[in-house]
Image: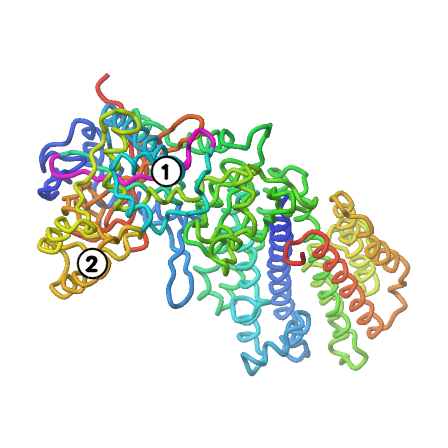
Amino acid sequence: MASLWNEYAVSEAYDEMRCSKNLARASADRLSNYLDSLDGNALDVRKTAAEMAIMEMGITFTVYSDEGNIDRAWPFDIIPRIIENKEWQNVAVGLKQRLKALNCFINDVYNEQLFIKEGLIPESIITSSTNFLQECVGMNPKYGAWANICGSDLVRDKDGTLYVLEDNLRVPSGVSYMIENRVITKKVFPELLQDLDVLPVDDYPVNLYEMLSSIAPEHVESPRIAVLTPGIFNSAYFEHAFLAQQIGAELVEGADLVVQDDDCVYMRTINGLEKVDVIYRRIDDRFLDPEVFNKDSMLGVKGLIRAWKKGNVSLANSPGSGVADDKVVYAYVPEMIRFYLNEEPLLPNVPTFLCSEPDQLDYVLTHLEELVVKPANESGGYGMLVGPHATKNEIEGFRKVIKSNPRNYIGQPTLALSTCPTLCNNHLEPRHIDLRPFILQGESSFVTAGGLTRVALKKGSLVVNSSQGGGSKDTWIINTGK
Amino acid sequence: MLSRSAERLYWLARYLERTENTARLLSVYMNLMFDMPMDVQVSWRNLLTIFGAENAFLKLYDVPNEQNTMRFLLTDTANPGSLFSSLNAARENIRTSREIMPDEAWQQVNEMYLFAKENVNNATNRRGRVLILTEILRGCQRFTGFMSGAMSHDDALRFIRIGRAIERADMTTRILDIATVLLADDRSDKTRQYENTMWMNVLKSLSALLMYRKHRRHRINSGDVLDFLLKDPDFPRSVRYCVKDAEVYIKRLPRSEGLIDNLVVLAESLIAVDIYSIDPLQLHHFLDEIQSSLAVTHNQIASTWFLSST
């Protein structure tokens, strides 16, 4: 019988499942063979089953369009992505290390500023960061943990090395899809999961709950926790509701909360007002409190920052954490790890050229055709240039944009993101992927087993964002070789 | 519980009950029309009257024939009172209440919605409509059954029960209002011959036929049917039962002082009225009063517990 893999064209990028057309990676051997035992049609049947499950479970994300907001079914590819547990354990330690250093940095920036005083970062980078909030100076969140929830994006280059591409410290999303993807895989490939030693992913909510409890204000016995959402029209509303349900928290919108004269936060319930101790907020800093930030914000809660500064409520992530979620600051993370933790970084950064530095700017401007250029503060893959895929006009346009505001741009070499077999019209083709693990830090640290693998469904594309035609895969951290 | 959640659960229950009752009414009316000889003047327009939707209909359609009326009441989402609109609203309320409801509850409503969406084109013929209505009715009942086995008897369930009771009472009065049309003095002799068929269908539309027969032991007649559906203390779709139900659950909620007074008065007036001796016009007014009184209770509930009123 002709093998499914005969037509699988491994490119120059690292493939997560196949060393070559004829040879599976050791960790993916069983999965490879299993897939081969099904033909294209059988795979398509599974795919349809997955789509049905997604529709019925109502796993959606919202897309903004001219015709209004549409709830789209979550795009999911049934072929899982495999990482060997041995490798993953090292990555997990590296991720914890990274978040610890980032939190030390944020705490330092809002207090003594030793990192600046030591000359390790120019002060202007901090003061010019739109995410640096003057209101947060002098604050000292419990355990020094400002960013309690971090989603870091990892990519694997040609040679197999995993790089940290960015750290999302504001309101990273995707963890609910990570959990739901596994639920779907269990429905689609039950026989397979039974035979393989794959780490579970559904312990995240328990750890999220523990972390949120651990950061409650002092002397609160059993804290009341709320998830603050911008509302039902937000693209991640599904996730907000999912997490609130999973951790048994209240899902609130700004209008549900009120700060009283005692500087405590209360929610409006059928019993009247009830005090809230911890808020996992999924609203950006600037919209949190119209009293302090955006005066026109309808999403936030008047007086929330006041209550937070008095220590009457804990916010996760702490306002101001975004100062370290800046692609310029990113370049300094390895140095932070050395400075604050006195350790060597376990996970490498992608080499980064800062357009704020004249010599590096020159390099970027003369190598636009081969670089990826990103704005320092955007997320969701917006406003970036992928040099090798861009037209001449796009490159020239970007050149002007960079020159007009160099502080806001960085350049990075275009990595050949690794690929993973993906089901395309009844057969398997390599598609580029990345990985977003989620890291928690409160009293202790936690890393998800794997994370959310995002896949660029379009052939050759490197853009994995769901808002731009990306999909996702279940991620298996697998124990092999007993 | 959050005021916002209470409000959504209440409306979830109302919309779902409305979905179910609309399905009942449409399928029974279809059956009735099949029973009627061609020359009996029962028109599809009556259906629009029951829903109080004649004006809204005429804005979108011209002739109230079977095709148009059914589309308007069943699948037309431009009509906020259509079955699909109610189902959409129910789904939206439960979609935004997922943190307080078991997953399966959401999935059941979502499946119903997906089914409806998929079959919207089949609704143009009678057979397709029968299938859709049957499936919707089943879905609603599955949901009710699931909830009774999976939800703790806490405040969340109380708001669901209250919303359901109020919507149900309201809908029963609307269905009975058909009597005021059918019993009009100027009805033809031919229509009079088929009166019992109509009453039987009214009972059927509320799944009340068997219980009526068991408890009344009379042959079907207008007075007994009205009495049963308005005043019976034990039948779960009678107005009196629903009013009592709402009262029971309101009483158990926090800050409910004084909130049941209106319902107590309503229950008393139901007990006091002699349904056998009032004429169709008086009946129509009485049903109107019940609907207004239910609206008063709704407003009291909203201003006591809901976010939109604070």
Q: Amino acid at mark 1?
A: Ile
> Is residue A463 toward the left or the right of residue A128 in the image?
left
Residue A139 percent across, percent down from the top left? 46, 38
User: What residue is at 54 percent from the left and 61 percent from the top?
Assistant: B130
Q: Residue B23 lies in what quarter of the image?
A: bottom right
Q: Which residue is label 2 attached to?
A: A402
Please state which of residues A276 and A156 is positioned toward the viewer in this rendering. Answer: A276
Q: Is residue A314 visible?
A: yes
Please state which of residues A83 and A110 is positioned toward the viewer in this rendering. Answer: A110
User: What residue is at 48 percent from the left and 44 percent from the top?
Assistant: A281
Residue A375 percent across, percent down from the top left? 26, 53
Residue B100 percent across, percent down from the top left? 57, 42
* Rendered-image quadrant of the N terminus of chain A: top left
Q: Please identify the residue farthest to the front as the structure is shown.
A: A117
A151 in magenta: yes
Could you tell me which chain the residue with mark 2 belongs to? A
How crowded pointer 2 is (Cα within 10 Å; few <14, some 14-19, many 20+) is rated as many
How crowded pointer 1 is (Cα within 10 Å; few <14, some 14-19, many 20+) is rated as many
Q: CA distance from mark 1 to mark 2?
A: 27 Å
> Is residue A454 toward the left or the right of residue A249 in the image?
left
Please, what secondary structure does the residue beneath circle 2 have?
A: helix
In the rendered image, the vertical position of residue A233 relative to residue A334, given as above or below: below
Tell me the magenta residue range.
A142-159
Please state which of residues B145 and A216 is positioned toward the viewer in this rendering. Answer: A216
Q: Please identify the residue farthest to the top as the structure is shown.
A: A482
Q: Are marks 1 and 2 on the same chain?
A: yes
Q: Which residue is label 1 attached to?
A: A106
* Rendered-image quadrant of the C terminus of chain A: top left
Looking at the rendered structure, which numbered label has been put on residue A426?
none
